[in-house]
Amino acid sequence: MVNRLGSFQTIDGRLLGENAVQQVTEDDLEAFIKHLTTLGRASSTRNHYVQLIRAMSRWAVKKGFRQTPLVGDDSDVIRRRKEAQRHRRLDPGEEDRLLRAAERHLQALIVAALETCCREGELLTLQWGDVSLTRGEILVRAENTKDRENRIIPISDRLRKVLEMRRNSPAGVPFPASAYVFGDEIGRRVHKVRRAWQTAVLRAHRHRPVWIWKKKSGRTVRGSRG
């Protein structure tokens, strides 16, 4: 995002990143945000850049590089837009098909997501120190959430069964507080489940996924086709 911002060509023909911090104007940044709009970027993408610009503005003033912010609070352009609301709902029978098609780790994540409405990243960063089966609640820490606010979520009966099944290590002892609830078999963090999810979705809709190796940016990575 910083690279894209810095490579934007301003009205004087220079790249934005070539200017000293003191030379960057609000007009330059407003022109960049308008440029994103002309490119058809989603409101969520635009809002990420707005957040970045405001963070850079606070940093520049705090460090003494500028006396005034890069953008003013009265700018109609440098303002977060309301994102389109999502209304995705499971179709009848879709949950059962997904659970049947998923492996055990993904099954637990699917149940947890449905019972808590947490995002993938919030669940994958959840540690046992933030789970209290006694009080029946989960603490989702601010540093792992999109809105940067702590959330307390009650543990439903269905989720409790999943957590109790994952509570102990292969040696039969409870995981320490630092272990990840939806980590691997010894409590280490799992960073993403994208491939497992794609596989389950394809199988749930009666497709047979085939994973293939392909070249991407000089690296060999695994892709998919169904």
Image (cartoon, helix red, strand yellow):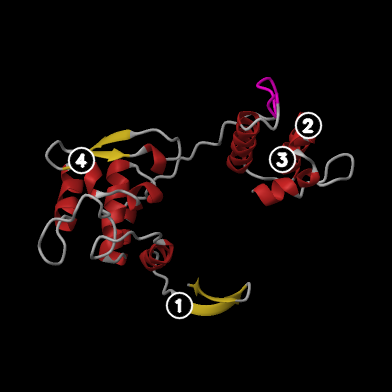
Report how many numbered discs are placed on residues in the image. Answer: 4
- Distance between mark 3 and mark 4 Cα atoms: 41 Å
- Find disc 2 in the rendering and name its residue: 25
Residue located beneath label 4 in the image: 155
Q: Position of residue 33 (x, y in %)?
A: 72, 38
Question: Which is in the foreground here, disc 4 or disc 2?
Answer: 2
Front in this rendered view, residue 33 or 162: 33
Residue at image mark 1: 210
Compared to residue 221, the image places residue 107 above or below, namely: above
Q: Secondary structure at mark 4?
A: loop
Question: Between disc 1 and disc 3, whose residue precedes?
Answer: 3
Chief SS of the magenta region: loop
Magenta residues? 67-76
Q: For mark 3, give the secondary structure.
A: helix
Mark closest to the chain's N terminus, 4 or 2: 2
Query: How far is disc 3 from disc 2 in space, using C-alphas?
Result: 19 Å
Amino acid, disc 1: Val
Which numbered disc flags the more N-terminal residue, 3 or 2?
2
Residue 115, by quadrant, is top left
Q: Which mark is residue 37?
A: 3
Among numbered discs 3 and 4, the one appearing first in the sequence: 3
Q: Residue at left 27%, top 36%?
A: 153
Report how far apart the C-alphas of labels 1 and 4 lie in the structure.
37 Å
Residue at 61% x, 34% y is 59
| Residue farthest toward the front in the current orientation of the protein | 64
Task: Look at discs 3 and 2 and give the one toward the viewer.
Answer: 2
Q: Nearer the viewer, mark 1 or mark 4?
A: 4
User: In the rendered image, is residue 145 in sight?
Assistant: yes
Instruction: Say above or below: 30 vs 132.
Output: above
The answer to which of marks 1 and 4 sits earlier in the sequence is 4
Label 4 vs label 2: CA separation? Answer: 50 Å
